[in-house]
Image: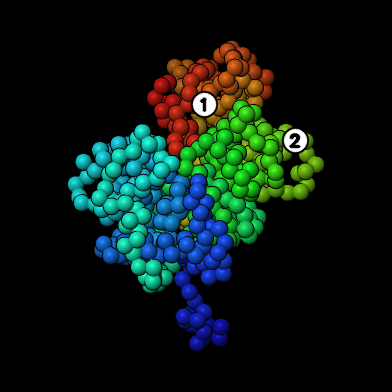
């Protein structure tokens, strides 16, 4: 054995389990009187946030919540769900944030499958929640969030306890425990499955800590930033920013609902510097009426993830004063694990080429050990030619522990020592990844692979197209052909023939959509297009 390993062991002085809970404790100790969270007229300092969090954790333990049990939250982006990212794990329990747009059946499934002991829920969501609770075959403690900024026409009491009253039953001197093992679960997020029941993705304290530190480096996030919560905090724990921002003594400004006029107002009032959002949100920002927009006082940094955004979005956002960075990740990877890190030499390219590069998924985050494009059959890297399609595979400390109570699915996802994303991509000569499609979205026409994303990018360049989504349409001759669904720009009519002719200008004939449907596209709560709904139509 090496001398470096002899009598040089881990001990309490040199090895402490990593947990993002320490970020809040540090903020409270160093910056107690700095503004931490702002929501409408509610304004909390770090000392106040810490006190509220500790009291809520204490209140949970008083009603019997124990280490390893599940506490669910069904809430909008308000201070309560931010606080939950600390209060729940302070008890040793696991935070389960649930998508607010889910139906009663799925909510019931998640509460049952997660073995939730407590559900904290916004009263505006009473309709689906009450239906879910009727079919839930177990007792669960319900705590209501009674927010005066909720839609008052939709409010109804759900449980016997109310958030603020319950919080005040807790002890502000409660001695919460650090996790004795950084591998301990901190949160549980359910995937938005398109078929069957959603899968529960388990995060650990170590991964949450490393995602927070890696995010700040990858995005050049400074201390004292002003962060706007556009990404729902139920989605991948808000891409882990409820843990990242306190580390930087940043202010979190809560946005309850996606309201573009409100986004511009908050940017102006609080000098917002950073926010994240799906491409659909960026599309809404650039397409907003001039009366809703405000001229930016400073540059605003934006992360976008989800379906790869059309390159035209980058041009439109830059014109308004936003600097957009494209990132990529999954629920299973704590959110983003790749970024389109910019190289200065690209500044010499023309704007169209720059925007094309910005639409790539890019290279791995500093907290990610491996992101590669492999042939899923041979598990060998694809050539770096920008053409050969393989599957994105990921390795590192920000890959989930696994799927909750699903050993088979976990083993399948982690086969051969890599997490299999299911996303098909090419690798460029410079090592930058560009997604071609989800494996289930690739169109195979006459034996040729067609990227639906390539067609969507082309369609989105037409001035009359607001959003485009392309899926495979069954065809007797070719097996499958592309079918485009279009949300048109208001007051800019366009015909099916015009769009097909527009595609013919730049796309190979077999890639041109054979049919165009005009409609409002079905979307998830995070702005992703629900292509499975479109496939049903064709």
User: Alpha-carbon distance for marks 2 and 1?
Assistant: 26 Å
- Identify the image quadrant of residue 61: bottom left
Q: Give the residue at the far front of this rendering.
A: 41
SS label for mark 1: strand
Is 134 on the left-hand or right-hand side of 437? left
- Residue depicted at 67% across the width and 23% down the height: 506
Find out whether the residues at labels 2 and 1 contact each other: C-beta distance under 8 Å.
Answer: no
Closer to us: 495 or 369: 495
Residue highlighted by disc 1: 470
In the rendered image, residue 263, in percent from the top left (x then y), is placed at 57, 39
The answer to whether any part of residue 267 appears in the image is yes
Disc sitting over residue 303 in the figure = none
Looking at the image, which residue is at 55% across and 64% down?
33
Tell me which corner region of the image, top left, top right, bottom left or bottom right, holds residue 51.
bottom left
Q: Say which residue label 2 marks.
A: 351
Seen in the image, is 123 located left or right of residue 276? Answer: left
Viewer-proximal residue, 122 or 180? 122
Residue 78 in percent (x, y) is at 45, 48
Quarter holding the C terminus is: top left
Mark with earlier residue (2, 1): 2
Q: Residue at x 55, y 42 (%)?
A: 277
Q: Position of residue 358 (x, y in %)?
A: 66, 41
228 or 31, which is in the foreground?
31
11 sits to left or right of 501: left
Q: Is residue 493 above or below residue 393?
A: above
Q: Is residue 67 above or below residue 448?
A: below
Q: At which x and y percent is residue 456?
A: 57, 28
Residue drawn at the location 65% of the way across and 58% of the way down: 222
Badge nearest the viewer, 2 or 1: 2
Using a 10 Å C-alpha cutoff, classify the residue at mark 1 as few (fewer than 14 neighbours), some (14 to 19) or many (20 or more). many
> Could you tell me if residue 362 is visible in this image?
no
SS category of the residue bearing label 2:
helix
């Amino acid at each position: 054995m090496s001398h470096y390993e002899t009598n040089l062991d881990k001990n309490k002085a040199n090895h402490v389990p990593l947990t993002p809970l320490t970020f809040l404790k540090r903020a409270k100790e160093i910056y107690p009187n700095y503004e931490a969270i702002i929501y409408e007229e509610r304004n909390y300092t770090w000392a106040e946030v810490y006190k509220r969090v500790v009291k809520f954790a204490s209140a949970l333990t008083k009603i019997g919540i124990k280490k390893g049990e599940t506490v669910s939250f069904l809430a909008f982006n308000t201070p309560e769900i931010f606080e939950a990212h600390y209060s729940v794990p302070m008890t040793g329990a696991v935070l389960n944030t649930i998508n607010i747009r889910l139906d009663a059946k799925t909510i019931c499934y998640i509460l049952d499958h997660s073995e939730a002991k407590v559900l904290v829920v916004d009263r505006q969501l009473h309709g689906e929640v009450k239906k879910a609770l009727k079919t839930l075959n177990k007792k669960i403690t319900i705590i209501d969030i009674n927010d005066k900024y909720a839609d008052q026409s939709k409010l109804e009491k759900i449980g016997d306890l109310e958030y603020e009253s319950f919080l005040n039953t807790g002890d502000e001197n409660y001695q919460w425990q650090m996790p004795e093992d950084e591998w301990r679960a901190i949160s549980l997020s359910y995937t938005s499955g398109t078929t069957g029941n959603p899968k529960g993705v388990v995060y650990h304290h170590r991964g949450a800590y490393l995602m927070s530190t890696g995010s700040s480096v990858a995005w050049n996030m400074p201390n004292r930033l002003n962060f706007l919560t556009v990404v729902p905090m139920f989605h991948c724990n808000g891409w882990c920013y409820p843990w990242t921002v306190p580390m930087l003594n940043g202010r979190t400004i809560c946005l309850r609902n996606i309201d573009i006029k409100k986004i511009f107002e908050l940017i102006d009032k609080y000098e917002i510097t950073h926010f994240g959002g799906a491409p659909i949100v960026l599309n809404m920002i650039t397409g907003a009426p001039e009366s809703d927009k405000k001229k930016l006082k400073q540059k605003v940094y934006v992360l976008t993830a989800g379906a790869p955004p059309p390159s035209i979005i980058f041009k439109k956002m830059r014109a308004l004063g936003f600097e957009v960075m494209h990132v990529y990740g999954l629920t299973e990877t704590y959110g983003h694990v790749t970024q389109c890190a910019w190289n200065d030499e690209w500044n010499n390219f023309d704007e169209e080429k720059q925007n094309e590069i910005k639409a790539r998924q890019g290279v791995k985050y500093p907290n990610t050990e491996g992101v590669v494009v492999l042939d899923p059959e041979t598990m060998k890297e694809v050539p770096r030619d920008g053409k050969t399609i393989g599957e994105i595979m990921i390795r590192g400390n920000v890959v989930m522990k696994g799927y909750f109570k699903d050993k088979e699915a976990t083993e399948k996802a982690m086969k051969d020592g890599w997490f299999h994303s299911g996303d098909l991509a090419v690798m460029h000569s410079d090592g930058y990844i560009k997604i071609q499609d989800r494996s289930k979205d690739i169109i195979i026409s006459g034996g040729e692979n067609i990227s639906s994303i390539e067609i969507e990018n082309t369609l989105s360049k037409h001035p009359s197209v607001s959003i485009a989504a392309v899926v495979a349409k069954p065809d007797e001759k070719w097996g499958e052909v592309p079918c485009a669904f279009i949300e048109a720009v208001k007051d800019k009519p366009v015909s099916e023939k015009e769009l097909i002719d527009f595609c013919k200008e730049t796309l190979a004939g077999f890639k041109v959509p054979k049919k165009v449907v005009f409609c409002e596209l079905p979307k998830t709560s995070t702005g992703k297009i629900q292509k499975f709904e479109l496939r049903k139509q064709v």
